Image: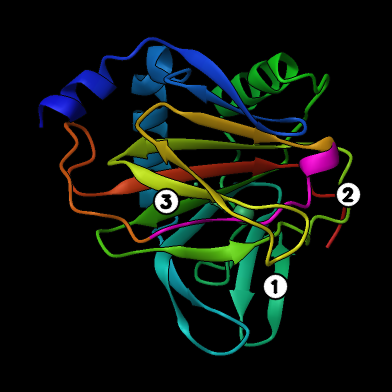
Amino acid sequence: MTIDLFDDNEQPHMEQIGPEAFIFYRSANHIEHIFTREIRRLLQVEPPRQMRTPSGLPMSVLSSACGSWGWQSSENGYSYTDASPISNKQWPQMPSAFKDFAAQIAAQAGFANFSPNSCLINCYSVGSKLGLHEDRDEGDFSQPIVSLSFGIPAIFLWGGPKRNDKVKRFRLCHGDVVVWGGQSRRYYHGVSQIKSGCHESWGSKRINLTLRYVERV
Ligand code: SIN
Ligand code: FE2
């Protein structure tokens, strides 16, 4: 517990984890109240739901989305849709605070003019995990990925261009942001099984926002 408290008070700092890939620790903390409010609102408009993998297995994370495109996984494969398959309405608009923050942190990582039009909202509970995968459904790989973590910590798995490349592990806490693009854009990554914990705003949940630019479906 002492260690967790210490971690949460850490100052923002940056670590390079791969070619054109960085973690900006605690960099979203100064605007966490905006993210907390907006994420709660978005999850009320489009409640997170359990998707299935193309092999038919239920995913252990619950997902929602905002922006022009929402990422989907189902028995038919992976895709981006412009409307929620649950409400049949267009995904809620991406808050400008998300876009502005992502563009600014991407620029710090060397990616000028990042303009995300898709934001996946993944909700993890204790025991949830996300297997190693590459983000490859966007139809454009010139723009980076910006991933924000809130709530209880996770171990982020960071591999290489091939599935069986050696994996490094990084602990992501509330307010941490990972940016990867360029040479790392198609690198394998994932999240190991979430351990129990308690966060003052999110209880025993972890929320991850993944902002991307999608060219087409
Ligand atoms: C993802 O790869 O889509 C999410 C990564 C994370 O939850 O940190
Ligand atoms: Fe991913």
Rate crowding at label 1 as few (under 14), some (14 to 19) or many (20 or more) other CA atoms within 10 Å. some
Residue type marked 3: Val
Q: Is residue 157 above or below residue 13?
A: below
Q: Which residue is mark 2?
A: 140
Q: Which residues are magenta?
A: 183-192
CA distance for labels 2 and 1: 15 Å
Disc 2 residue: CB within 8 Å of ligand 2: no
Measured from the top left, where is residue 38 in percent x and y? 41, 33
Quadrant in which residue 81 is drawn:
bottom right
| Earlier residue among tags 1 and 3 | 3
CB-based contact (under 8 Å), mark 2 and mark 3: no
Q: Which residue is mark 3?
A: 45
Query: Which numbered disc, 1 or 3, marks the residue closer to the eye?
Result: 1
| Earlier residue among tags 2 and 1 | 1
Q: Residue furthest left?
A: 1
Q: Quadrant of the N terminus?
A: top left
| Earlier residue among tags 2 and 3 | 3
- Which type of secondary structure does the marked residue at label 2 adopt? loop
Q: Residue furthest front?
A: 166
Q: Which residue is mark 1?
A: 78
Q: Is residue 84 above or below residue 199?
A: below
Query: Which numbered disc, 2 or 3, marks the residue closer to the eye?
Result: 2
Residue type marked 1: Tyr
Query: Does the segment drawn in magenta span residue 34?
Result: no
- Which type of secondary structure does the marked residue at label 1 adopt? strand
Measured from the top left, where is residue 192 in percent x and y? 41, 58
Q: In percent of the image, x 54 and y 90: which residue is there?
A: 56
CA distance for labels 1 and 3: 23 Å
